[in-house]
């Protein structure tokens, strides 16, 4: 099987993802620290070895789900036994009160879930307007600039008020928590499971960069 060439992925996208990795695992990469990393496996090992916490053999995604379920039970007054991993988010968060309920849930958890988005048609219209405004800059810079400002403001407002769910089930939210808030999702944020770091990173790279997990091998090359 051929190795996936990570060099074909936008370096800025990888850089943005690594910033999220730093936050999730409470680590910090030096400016030149990762220059020697050439494969995905080396990156996984480097991150796992960089986390200076007690290593315990337990499942973070399971703990994330229990933490999520407890928070939902407390904020929405819903019995835990009625909240399986495949429970639909749309049934749990009705559209008319969705944003308020999720805000309360995030406050209880202590971090943002970022599971709401604008409708795709709104994103599409704003994207077209942004492109038109950019082209207009070459012919009428004042109109083009106004269009750019309007489009950017539109994206900001749409993201702030978007009410569409970006995920479908509680289990998917727990998986997202495991990736983006790894330590905060654990019972003890001063511990981690070294064995699962590679899986977490594989899921993360696949989800955020659109990579096929079957091709995201330890030998997949960055250079």
Image (cartoon, rainbow, N blue to C red):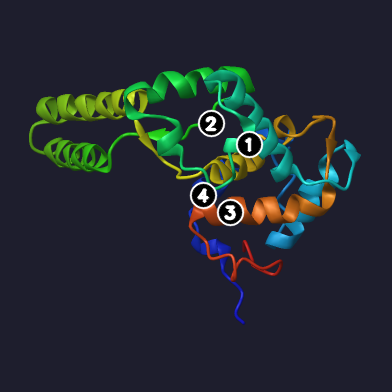
Label 3: which secondary element: helix
The residue where tag 3 is placed is 205
For discs 1 and 4, the disc positioned in front in the rendered view? 1
- Mark 2 packing: few (<14 Cα in 10 Å), some, or many (20+)? some
In this view, 161 is above or below 198: above
Give the mark nearer the N terminus: 1 vs 3.
1
Q: Quadrant of residue 20?
A: top right
The residue where tag 4 is placed is 208
Instruction: Give left or right: position of 133 versus 17.
Output: left
Which mark, residue 81?
1
Q: Are marks 2 and 1 in contact (CB under 8 Å)?
A: no
Residue at 83% x, 42% y is: 50
Label 1: which secondary element: helix
Q: CA distance from mark 4 to mark 3?
A: 5 Å
The residue where tag 2 is placed is 113
Q: Quadrant of residue 135?
A: top left
Which mark, residue 100?
none
For discs 2 and 1, the disc positioned in front in the rendered view? 1
The residue furthest bottom is 1
């Amino acid at each position: 099987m051929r190795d996936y060439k990570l060099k074909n992925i936008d370096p800025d996208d990888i850089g943005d993802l690594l910033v999220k990795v730093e936050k999730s695992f409470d680590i910090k990469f030096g400016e030149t620290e990762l220059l020697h990393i050439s494969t995905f496996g080396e990156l996984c090992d480097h991150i796992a070895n960089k986390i200076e916490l007690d290593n315990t053999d337990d499942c973070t995604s399971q703990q994330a789900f229990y933490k999520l379920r407890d928070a939902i039970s407390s904020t929405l007054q819903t019995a835990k036994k009625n909240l399986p991993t495949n429970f639909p988010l749309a049934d749990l968060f009705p559209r008319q009160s969705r944003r308020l309920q999720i805000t309360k849930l995030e406050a209880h958890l202590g971090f943002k879930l970022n599971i709401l988005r604008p409708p795709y048609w709104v994103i599409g219209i704003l994207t077209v307007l942004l492109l038109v405004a950019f082209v207009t800059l070459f012919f009428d810079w004042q109109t083009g600039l106004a269009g750019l400002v309007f489009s950017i403001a539109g994206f900001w407002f749409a993201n702030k008020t978007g009410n569409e769910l970006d995920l479908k089930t509680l289990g998917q939210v727990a998986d997202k928590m495991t990736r983006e808030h790894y330590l905060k999702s654990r019972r003890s944020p001063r511990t981690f499971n070294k064995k699962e770091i590679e899986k977490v990173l594989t899921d993360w790279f696949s989800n955020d960069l659109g990579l096929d997990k079957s091709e995201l091998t330890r030998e997949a090359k960055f250079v």
